[in-house]
Image: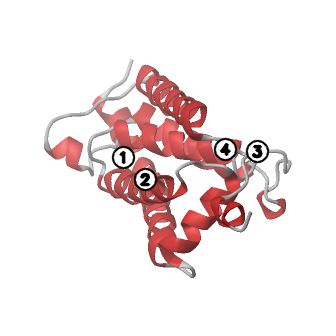
Amino acid sequence: MKTRSNRAGNDGPVLLLRLAIGPMLIAHGYNKVFGKGGLTGTTAWFDSLGLKPANVHARMAAATEIGSGALITLGAASPLPAAAAIGLMATAAQTDHKGKGFFVFKGGWEYTAVVGVVAAVIAAVGPGRYSVDALRGRQRTGLHWGLAAAVFGIGSSMALLAASYHPDETPVDEAVGD
């Protein structure tokens, strides 16, 4: 049985997880918009991956990374931002990292798996006492919340990929010259 003192023991570690994953997601989203190549470069990259329409997906990915990262950092609206992060990572694993093995330094899915699992853990343990949700008196914790975030995130990714992932199509830039 959970006691108040046992629950309080999770608050510091979950805050550290949120402060590691949330800002990292924000930085990735920011880089998609303002990094080298900017949104134009991100759109071209998404087009080469087969995500159509690439300009919509580039903006959606950046906004989702920035938004879910901010909410995870603040510990707000849990477990929804965790589900969003899981969906992002599932989509990345199936597009950019697919077929490249495990290790991220070889382009593999290691990074996406770790971020997705950490997001699921945050959803399961809740954002903790040092969070916006705690200030609002709205704490959702338990394995079922972590599983729900995983199912929703992976399901959303599968739906997005079914509707928009066309890796065998020639990118728009190359088709124009034909």
The residue that mark 4 highlights is: 113
The mark total stands at 4
Q: Indicate which disc, 1 or 2, sits on the residue closer to the N terminus.
A: 1
Tag 1 or tag 4, which sits nearer the N-term?
1
Query: Disc 4 on helix, strand or loop?
Result: helix
Mark 4 to mark 2: distance in Å? 21 Å
78 to the left or right of 43:
left
Q: Label 2: how many residues lie within 10 Å, few (<14), some (14-19) or many (20+)?
A: few
Can you identify the residue that label 1 sits on? 11
Write down the quadrant of residue 91 in the picture. Answer: top right
Q: Residue pushed farthest left? A: 136
Residue at the outermost front position: 178
- Camera-nearest label, 4 or 1: 4
77 vs 96: above or below: above
Residue at which label 2 appears: 60
The quadrant of the image that shows the C terminus is bottom right
Q: Position of residue 85 (x, y in %)?
A: 48, 45
Left/right of residue 74 with respect to residue 119 in the rendered view:
left
- How many other residues sit within 10 Å of disc 4, few (<14), some (14-19) or many (≥20)? some
SS class of the residue under badge 1?
helix
| Mark found first going from the N terminus, 4 or 2 | 2
Amino acid bearing label 1? Asp
Point out residue 166 in the picture as x, y percentages from the top left corner. Answer: 67, 42
